[in-house]
Image (cartoon, rainbow, N blue to C red):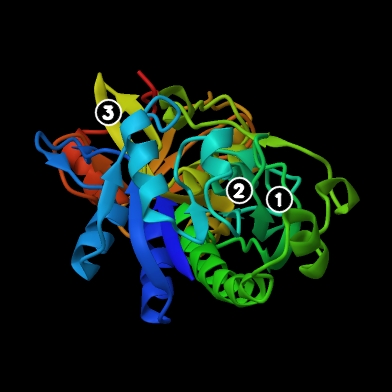
Amino acid sequence: MKIIFWGTPKYAADNLIHLVNEGQEVIAVVTQPDRKRNRGKNLSPSPVKQAALDFGIPVYETKSIRKDKNTKNQLTKLNADIYIVVAFGQILPKEILEQPKLGCWNSHASLLPAWRGAAPIQWSILNEDRKTGVCIMAMEEGLDTGPVIEHETTEINETDNLEILTNRLSRISAKLLIKALKAIKMTIGLNTNERLLQLKAIEQSKLNGETSYARQINKEDYLIDWTLSAKKIIKRIKGLYPNTYTFYNGKRVKVIEASLARDNSMINENQLIDNNNIAKRKPGEIILIDQRNGIVIMTKDYPILIEYGQLEGKKRTDGYTLSRQSNICINDIMGN
């Protein structure tokens, strides 16, 4: 089958690489245009574009496929059998969905109908879900509404952050796509309804779980609100890893890894933090700076330990070194 692959981030690139390495015939890739990344001044290709170039696969870039008549026409001429979409970042219009003979199929990183939309992995962590997964679905005009032909579940562990969970889901997605492609290939010659019937596609209304939407993450989401509970702040640090931040003396400070301070044996053994003392502390107040462990900061209900962070203009470092770089003082308020 001649495949056109649609995708943009590393998550999608890992899927593309797996498909090619498994011998799938990817004849072209569609991705978002080059842009500045990681505060760089020069334009950089998307991970999917870079992977395609490494394989010598033709690349089509589009800022808006809905408005891009030229790309639409070029894709039509390629006469692909099937479109595979993984985290492309745009909703495909009806005329694109109708182009390939075997349909458009999306690998979505959630257990549909939960977390339809742009940021399902982030919101599954932020919402403190216990499990998530990947679904392979037939694409429709709606936002992630199509019937599902393959799915797999994975637990969300306490140690999972966005990077760890994304990598695990990407591996699951790549495996399910190979399985789905083999099944879809067996439906050549059938019409859409016959194909879905043979593939035992399940309408999302018949799947377990409630419908929810994973809106796009915006800049404000990354700013830590110290008036939230310790648990919610830690989930935010994990769910938006490694980009949550706060301010100290007007400078941006990334909080990359953190945990509940009570989970730290050194702090407990030496009773540097006790419940009577906690009640008097303000959200964002710096309670302790420890050379072996890091910076302890109060939240709404309990202190958290900043284990790794990054001061603007500096590299990632451990919590204690971060405190020295930032000239952090005990009893000051983080977030100013």
Q: Earlier in the sequence, mark 2 or mark 3?
A: 2
Residue farthest toward the left in the current orientation of the protein: 42
| Mark in front: 1 vs 3 | 1
The image quadrant where one finds the C terminus is: top left
Q: Which residue is mark 3?
A: 252
User: Amino acid under label 2?
Assistant: Ile
Closer to the camera, 173 or 38? 173
Disc 1 and disc 2 in contact, CB within 8 angstroms: yes
Q: CA distance from mark 1 to mark 2?
A: 6 Å
Q: CA distance from mark 1 to mark 3?
A: 29 Å
Q: Residue at x 43, y 56 (%)?
A: 79
Q: CA distance from mark 2 to mark 3?
A: 24 Å
Res 148 visible: yes
Above or below, comparing residue 133 to residue 31 in the picture: below
User: Amino acid under label 1?
Assistant: Asp
Closer to the camera, 293 or 82? 82
Give coordinates of residue 7: x percent, y percent: 41, 50
Q: Which residue is mark 1?
A: 129
Above or below, comparing residue 326 to residue 166 in the picture: above
Q: Residue at x 9, y 37 (%)?
A: 42
Residue 125, label in figure: 2
> Residue 179 is drawn in which quadrant?
bottom right
Q: Is residue 191 left or right of residue 158?
A: right
Q: Earlier in the sequence, mark 1 or mark 3?
A: 1
| Mark in front: 2 vs 3 | 2
